[in-house]
Amino acid sequence: MALPASKIVLWTCAVPSLASVEVLLTFVTPAVKWVLADVVLLRNHLAAAPRYYESWAATRTCQSVTPEELNLTGFTHINFAFAYFDPSSFQIAPMDPNSESLLGRFTALKTKLNGLETWISVGGWSFTDPGPTQEAFSTMSSTSANRQMFINGLLQFMNYYGFDGVDLDWEYPQADDRGGQPADTENYVALAKELKAALGQKGLSMTLPTSFWYLQHFDVNLLQEYVDWFNFMSYDLHGVWDAQSQFVGPYIAPHTNLTEIDLGLDLLWRAGVEADKVNLGMAWYGRSFTLSDPSCNTPNGVCQFSGGANPGPCSGTSGILDDQEIQDVITQNSLTPTWDHTAGVKWITWDSNQWVSYDDADTFQEKKDFASQRCLGGLMVWAMDQKDQGTSPNLKSTASNGTTCGQTFGVTTGDLHSISGKDNCSFNTSSICVPLECEVAQLGNNQTCTSMASSLSTSSINVTIALFLQWNPNIIGPCENLTVDQYICTGPPGGNYTLPAPISDTNSSAGGQQRGGQGSGSNPNGPDGPDGPTPNSTVSAPTQVGIAKNCNAFAYADTNDTCYDMSQSFDITLAQFTTWNPVLGYPDGQNCTTQFWTGYDYCVGVSGTSTSSSSISGESSATISSLSYQTQSASATISSLPYPTQSGITPACNKYADAKAGDYCYMFAQNNNITTDELYSWNGILGPNGANCSTEFQAGYDYCRCVLKVRNGKKHGNFYVFHPNKKHGNFYVFHHFVISDTYPKRSRKRLQQNRRSA
């Protein structure tokens, strides 16, 4: 199969109309090293899945990982670590010269996975090491003027490189061993408030430690008002530093154990933090030790270490091994890991006295279940480049008729390739993902992304810079000086666009574009004379995945339609429209540019609203009320759920899940990692022991799936502490990895009991 020269094509989601076809994924994205992920960390009810990318991974002497080599499957957000800022001018700058060239390549990754966001992480542990930047966070946040200088520079940096959000990693406010100052706690809240207001639609997150020693100086109850989420660093709970503390000692212990993680989360719950604001931290690396006694290798509060284990061949640091190195050790030594289900970790011993604890697919699943049961908002991983990045074999998968590559395989329209005449693509199968061409134009002098987006905009579509880059993912990084005669896409793949007039050196309008894909030009359900649109009560064209189950009014997308036009035509909000058609991206329709297709039916009304399909007339003023459901118990109005709830839901419910067609009570409980007793007690209509499940458990309704349980405790500062300690000074909690000599002394017996519980 040969492709014509000088054509720009997008390998997209179109599949030939065959009953069964094979899709060669390595052809679809030939420039990307595909990786088999052990586990996808995004589940239906854990909404956020941010991962960090270590910028220094690109320059490692072995097992280096560039942005283009990252496996993005299952990701929602990826954070670039790190950016620094000048301690005097507070202007953002790359962490080092090597990372500067990676920034634009990193943000370009969002064109490869629909809905992916790229964020910049500012700070990190090393930023507050002794040196010129140790007090930079304290100084920057100390005055309104300083904060404004930082915010202005940050926004300029984010806009220049195309970042969608910022993650603040201050380690740690008010900590005297990390350059902190007494006013840091209050100033950090002021920074968060002002930064959130300036960011607009861009996101804001913060990292939080698990130990009370550092966490006590975060006013988390106030901070949560301004952040989209907290990234809870529930790893590094133990390491070689334990040997320096008289209250912990040189005892081997897993650094990601669930017992201590649960204690850390309790601090947040008692401080009033909403569980949905917290992402559970996961680690793609392990903490390693050299055993004092090779015959004593169980983390039981007895077995000790003499120091860190030998450095890994690539990570090169004693006391730590990344996931790739751990898997190599297991394979080379034919090891069978020990799996501690209570702690939710595994460990191995090799070369007589080398020991490491770590997570893999099994323990990640345990932690996912743990997070789900505690109503957490999502999962966070440090760090995505530490995962085994070995090249996978040529992957062939079978797709059914009508299946799209992006829908099934994570392949999107973001893989743009320039094909020359010498590129002859041959395949061992005749059925592949068909490339769709886009309309192209050549650039003139002095063209920028801004001028191009402006020139391509028309009265019917506003082409933003983000949309222009979505069409042209081969434009990497800052694009203020594009190459003369460079080919660019002037619309989405397969679009029914009229090629704009030749682009001059000015910002003149290109004009003449039409919104939509390949359509017949006819509209069986659409505008019908002067009376305006009339929806159908039944489907007469294909629909996309996820359409509301209780939809009773459908409209056909014609060539010139847009999401906004359709919602306006039927007098519904964009939030309603995207709720009923979630493939378009709730609530702002962020996927409308790629997922709103001509020739498809979309839901414009559902049962349970004030207007059903039978009562919608041809008048353009027909009203479909907004969705706002209320349980028949004492709970408050639930305005964010796409489906109604039944009576008897506990007012303490934190999270909900919708019942799908074919579900029954036991299956629903299993799918949501809860017991049937919990399901029945939280959803009273189902009856004692589920006596009413056969009649009252109905598809298309939301049921409670999570109630956060908080232990009682006494308040100390911003936190309620659940420990039977007596107050010593400022009262310090004994748990986790940061131990101070000001902690209350405890007997060795009590310490060992505490370790055994972990």
Image: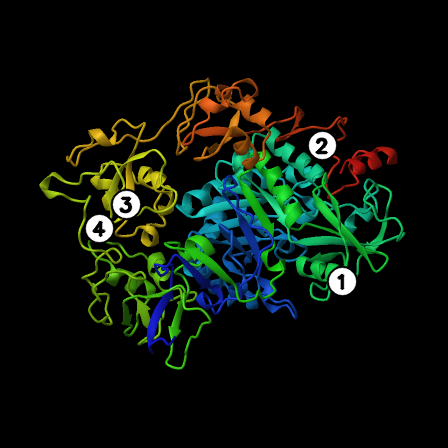
Point out the tag, 1 or 2, that comes first from the N-terminus: 1
Label for residue 558?
Answer: 4
Instruction: Pinpoint residue 157: horizontal percent, then vertical percent.
Output: 45, 58
Q: Amino acid at mark 2?
A: Asn
Give the amino acid type for the residue marked by disc 4 in the picture.
Asp
Residue 183 seen anywhere in this rendered image of the structure: no
Q: Residue at x 23, y 72 (%)?
A: 504
Which structural element holds mark 3? strand
Q: Is residue 142 left or right of residue 285?
A: left
Query: CA–CA distance between discs 3 and 4?
Result: 10 Å
Residue for badge 2: 730
Q: Name the residue type under label 3.
A: Asp
**Does residue 21 appear in the picture of this structure?**
yes
Q: CA distance from mark 4 to mark 1?
A: 61 Å
Q: Which residue is mark 1?
A: 311
Q: Residue furthest bottom?
A: 422
